[in-house]
Image: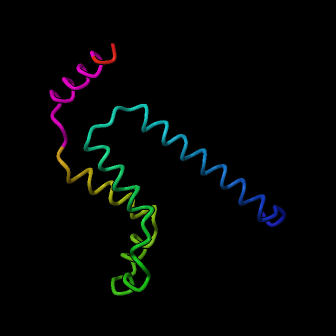
Amino acid sequence: MRQIPAPVLGGATMVMFGCVVAAGIRIITQTPLSRRDVLIVGLAFWRGSWRGVGAAFLSHFPPIVGDLFGSAATSGGLVAIALNLILPQEQAATKSLRSQDDRAESV
C-alpha cells in the first residue's frame, strides 16, 4: 500500500464507492417502493448526509453515543432501522391491490 501513490489510491476508492452506490440505486429502482419505503430511504439518506450533530454536542454523552452518531453512515443506518421498526407496514391485501392497479395502468 505504501508504493501506491495517494492520488491513485484515492481515485480507485472513488470509483469503488461509485460502483457500490450505483448498484444500490439499481436495487432500489428495481423494487416498487411504497410511501413508507420512500420515507425511510429519504430520511436515512438525509440523516446520513446531514452534518448537524457536532463533536461538541456528542461530548456530553457516553463514548458509544459518539461512536454511533458521529459517523454519517452509522447514524443513517440507525435511522433506517428505527423507522423500519416504528412505522406501520401496509396490509398485504392493500399492496396486492395496488400492484394489480399498477400493472393494469401500464398495459
In the image: residue 13, left or right of residue 59: right
Image x and y of residue 64, in percent: 38, 76
Report if residue 102 lies within the magenta region. yes
Vertical arrangement, residue 68 with respect to residue 29, above or below = below
Report if residue 92 lies within the magenta region. yes
User: What is the quadrant of residue 28 in the picture?
Assistant: top left
Quadrant in which the N terminus is drawn: bottom right
Majority SS type along the magenta span: helix
Image x and y of residue 55, in percent: 44, 82
Vertical arrangement, residue 93 with respect to residue 107, above or below = below
Q: Residue at x 27, y 37 (%)?
A: 34
Quadrant in which the C terminus is drawn: top left
In the image: residue 90, left or right of residue 21: left
User: What is the quadrant of residue 92 in the picture?
Assistant: top left
Vertical arrangement, residue 11 with respect to residue 100, above or below = below
Q: Which residues are magenta?
A: 89-104
